Image (cartoon, rainbow, N blue to C red):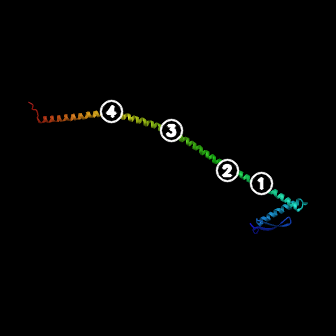
Amino acid sequence: MNSGDKTRITVDIYGMQYKLMGNSSVDHMKTVADFVNEHMLKISKNNSRLDTPRIAVLAAVNMADEYLRMKQEMERLQEDEQKKILIRNYNLLQEQYDKLQQEHRISAERLEEWKQKEKSLMEEYRALQEEHEQLKRQFREEVERLRAANPDTDALKQQLKQLKEEYGKLQNEYDEWIQLVQADPVKEQ
């Protein structure tokens, strides 16, 4: 900012005219001048024997003291605010931590349940596998027994076939005899 952009004002401080130039508004600069003037008047009222330079120094010391106290109070308030923010953040983090712990506990319980179910299913699977193996053995044994019994069945089937053939022959002979007997009846006398 160049000097053409600065605010210029004439103020009265402790009975003397001062030309001020700054970057602040006119109202702000008047407020500052009034503040300094009030401090100097207050000091001169309580200490009538002091000359102007001493009054100005004491006013500056008093204003610096007031400024530093306000600055410390502001810092303390900022620290208090920061502490409040930290406490709020800590409480939020604690709530999140508690929630995560609860979720972890629930997840751990579910995991344990799943492990138990898996163990139970594995035991059931093993039992079914053993039963399957036993049924396979029984099936193989039954197949072997049937195969061993099958030759007898084949022999019986062969005998049945021969018997049917013999029966067929005998039936044919019988039928022939019956026809002969019916064709040539024996006379009884």
Quarter of the rendering containing residue 179: top left
Q: Which residue is mark 4?
A: 149
Evaluate if marks 4 and 1 touch, with contact meaning CB atoms under 8 Å apart: no
Disc 4 versus disc 1: nearer the observer: 4
Quarter of the rendering containing residue 5: bottom right
Q: Quadrant of the C terminus?
A: top left
Q: Which of 48 and 25 lies nearest the eye of the viewer?
A: 25
Amino acid carrying label 1: it is Glu
Within 10 Å of disc 1 (Cα), the crowding (few <14, some 14-19, many 20+) is few
Evaluate if marks 3 and 4 touch, with contact meaning CB atoms under 8 Å apart: no
Disc 4 versus disc 2: nearer the observer: 4
Amino acid carrying label 2: it is Asn
Please tell me which residue is depicted at 40% across the width and 36% down the height of the picture.
136
Residue 175, percent from left and from top: 17, 36
Evaluate if marks 1 and 3 touch, with contact meaning CB atoms under 8 Å apart: no
Q: Earlier in the sequence, mark 4 or mark 1?
A: 1
Q: Which mark is residue 73?
A: 1
Q: Which of 179 and 12 lies nearest the eye of the viewer?
A: 12
Within 10 Å of disc 4 (Cα), the crowding (few <14, some 14-19, many 20+) is few
Amino acid carrying label 4: it is Ala
Amino acid carrying label 3: it is Ser
Q: Is residue 179 above or below residue 17?
A: above
Q: Earlier in the sequence, mark 4 or mark 2?
A: 2
C-alpha span from label 2 to label 1: 24 Å
Evaluate if marks 2 and 3 touch, with contact meaning CB atoms under 8 Å apart: no
Q: Given the current orientation, which residue lies at the most extreme front position?
A: 2
Q: Secondary structure at mark 1?
A: helix
Q: Which residue is mark 3?
A: 120
C-alpha span from label 3 to label 4: 43 Å
Evaluate if marks 4 and 2 touch, with contact meaning CB atoms under 8 Å apart: no
Q: Which residue is mark 2?
A: 89
